[in-house]
Amino acid sequence: MIEWEASGNSLRVVDADGTELSVRGGALSVDGPGPDIPRPVDETVVVTADELRFPHAVAYAFSLGSVEQYELDPNGAPLSLAPGEYVVDVDADIKTYLRFSGEATVRRTDDFAETVVTFPERVRAIVGFRSRHELPADAITVPDSVDAVARAISHLSSSHKTDSPDRTYPTLRGHPPLFERGEALEIPDCIRADTPDTGIELAVPPCYESLFVVAPLAYYLQARVAVENRVDPCLRLEDRGIERRLGPMPDLERDVERLLRKTFFLDCLVRNAGPYRTTLSEASILDALELDSEALYEATPQDRLEAYLEVPYAALEHRLPDWHLATYVTPDYDHVDALPFLLDRMSLLSLPRTSTLEGRELVRRSLEDFYRGERSGAGQVASVDIVKPELRSGRVHGWLADGVPIDVFKSTTEAYYNRLEYLKRSRDSTSICVVLNDPEMSGEHEDVAEIYRRRSEELTIDLAVEESLRTAELARVFEDEYDFVHYIGHCETDGLRCSDGYLSADSLDRCNAQTFFLNACGSFYEGMTLVEKGSVAGAVTFTKVLNEHAVKVGSTFAKLLVHGFSIERAMRLARRRIMMGKDYAVVGDGTHSLTQGEHRLPTTATVEEPEDGTHLLAFDCYSTRVTGSYYFPHTEDNEYAYLCGTESYFTLSASELETILAECEASVIYDGDIYWSRELSRKFRS
């Protein structure tokens, strides 16, 4: 769903996920809804202007009268288009297409903040928009039967818009249909019709364990899943007569991970033979492996997969981008309805296994006088028994099983359904409420309120600031439709402390706050209850926390969250600032983001200073929401784009480092702490 409104010389666009995009123009007039264009779009608008300014993005121009394609030079050189019929593809937060007739110049501004299309005179054009998030189209009813669930999984790839390597682009993978538990298998005709017959099959033993583990591979390969009386699962290419054995559990987890990562990676490289090309740093691997990208792009899914199977995993293991997400799920019928949500995020699935915490992984401290709330007569804090998960590959880890895990976000199936409900909300801005329920904690309160106010200058944010709320007043805050509630105060066994007692999340009929941060001692169980009552995700603590630490974590988390970082990633970075960071955790869907950032892919940089006087800058750019995307570091001499999950490294002078930090919006790890790029850039000013 796309909504738009015109105001002055700008066109503001918002999708169902709350993502905003602004198109500005010289003498811009918006003439109303437009006709279809030869691209997949949700909405089109007719505009007239002599110049159109889009957010910074990779941009291509396609000639409609020929097969010519042009890419805007990532280093900033303008692109001149001769008179003709064109579609310009702007790969922004909301996918944008511009169709026009005539000649034009496409360029980036000097600070790389905008992509600008300029015409010799005012031109009537069509602007099309496609949301990067899609709601599920329908639902499949599944009974408690391994065979029925296998058949249902076979239809989840009906949401793919292609079976070519272009399916690595997140915009060409829609949200899979939902699963609803019922007495008999029911697959709507529209889902059957949209399910491709690739001739690829995965055969598994009759158990939920194997079925859950192979689900991500089946979804991406658009494979049929069959249940057979066998010990070893296998992959079949029916038309080729090929059968590749996969190991039984638990080796199946490793085999699926390797096959999925290898196939996805090679597809990301081969897709450059198609219409959406870029100069990837990893592309030379295809030549080294003697793989013909042009032939593979045009090949059938079976032929392409057959070629990939011949590539030894060891031949490219060291070049694979880090996988973005792994979820540890109890493989039973109770968690079947979570599968479409996990596959939408392209998560690897593994069985939950734990070990005993050792050493100082959760440090028990004796500095009682400095614990948050200790000097304010705080009462008993709820105790939490922590387990240590055995983690597999993945930048982000989720836990959909019993137990309270460390180093992962603790999710529930309800959290994913809650996210769908919030996507249906009609909203013009992001609403944030900061609650200070203890005057001794005013430092954090002032810091985070100022962060939200500053961000509201760039993004539409409605900010409310409350102090010393009573239980009924705090209950109304959680019952109101805030997008984010930042609570600063105390949490005890009876609930969140208020001026007249305690508010237990159990007492709420419904929590309508989309996300939250309970920056209070021992808030884990209250946070879990808020998710069960309706929230998508939130940040919590396991135990007592030092007041100084709470201020550091709270302010850093706030900064990252309103700049587009997911809740889990924002918390993971924020807690680096303190020694006792593992006392903080995320509950609910940790992949959820509250807002968008200046750049579609949240970026973290690391700056090191070798002894030779130079500066080593590393970029780390990834998101659990847009797996398969790439990023382009705008250093002076860089010519390459990098797949998300692959870090890029550059050696720079102090002045070069200052320039790039000043121009980007990124969190930066420097000298053991977290900074914001534009603030840190001043340190390197000569």
Image (cartoon, rainbow, N blue to C red):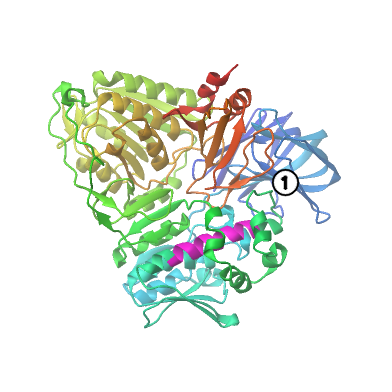
Quadrant where the C terminus is found in the figure: top right
Q: Quick check: 287 above or below 71? A: below
Q: Which residues are magenta?
A: 255-270
Identify the residue under disc 1. 60
Identity of the residue drawn at 37% across and 64% down: 180
Q: Quadrant of residue 20?
A: top right
- Is 512 in front, or is 522? 522
Identity of the residue drawn at 74% across and 41% down: 72
| Residue 260 included in the magenta stretch of the image | yes
Q: Position of residue 583 (x, y in %)?
A: 27, 37
Q: Quick check: 156 above or below 29? A: below
- Is 287 in front, or is 405? 287
Identity of the residue drawn at 62% across and 59% down: 166
In this picture, residue 633 sits left or right of residue 477: right
Q: Quick check: 60 above or below 489? A: below
Magenta-colored segment: predominant secondary structure: helix
